[in-house]
Image (cartoon, helix red, strand yellow):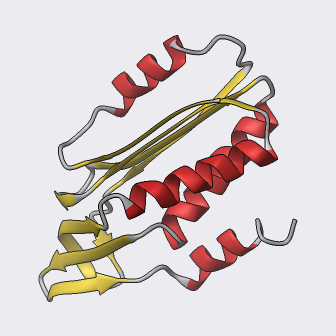
Amino acid sequence: MRTDIRIVSLPFDPESELATFRSSLQNAGGLVSFTGLVRPSSQGGEVSILSLQHYPGMTERGIAEAVAGAASRWPLEAALVIHRVGEMTPHEPIVLVATASVHRRAAFEAADFLMDFLKSRALFWKSETGAEGRQWIEPRDEDYADAARWDEG
């Protein structure tokens, strides 16, 4: 299986990345992608800046292990994970996950699995800056519950 995992500090174009990913596929019957955007508001109010930090090397290894876990569960041809770090403003792409498989269900489930990992278990530290100042963000209970469903099977 071909994998492409990148942690980037500069903005990226999800459509261009997906076109490149799609052009490299040979046997896939389905390609599923998810693009996450910086939200303009949160529970704390309006968000002007989202800041993400990571642990270089360790964060990428964790994501690579999650991708390998997805490949062991579903017959994937390829997987792409691009995640931003640094400071971002509302509506900017923060994450792109794409998976490709001969069958659609495998691609859907693998992408869902990877997003659940990124939301709850990947080594990122997030803070939001808004009118009330800077606040650190932790995964929500729902994020942990979503990720835990993959532990059951």
Q: In this view, does 43 lie above or below 100?
A: below
**Which quadrant of the structure image shows residue 31?**
top right
Residue at (15%, 78%) from the top-left corner?
A: 130
Measured as percent of width and height from the top left, residue 68 is found at: 65, 47
Front residue of this view, candidates 101 and 131: 101
Image quarter of residue 89: bottom left
Above or below for 42 versus 117: below
Q: Quadrant of the N terminus?
A: top right
Q: Which residue is drawn at 60% across and 15% down?
A: 25
Furthest residue in direction right, as rendered:
153
Residue 147: image quadrant is bottom right
Residue 148 screen position, x and y as percent: 72, 74
Q: Quadrant of the C terminus?
A: bottom right
Q: Is residue 122 left or right of residue 56?
A: right
Q: In this view, does 73 lie above or below 17?
A: below
Q: Total label count?
A: 0
Residue at position x 20%, y 49% from top?
A: 9
Side of 28 relative to 133 (left or right) = right
Q: Residue 7: x percent and y percent?
A: 32, 49
Q: Quick one: 95 or 89, which is closer to the camera?
A: 95
Vertical relation: 37 (above or below) 35: below
Image coords of residue 29 (percent x, y): 74, 19
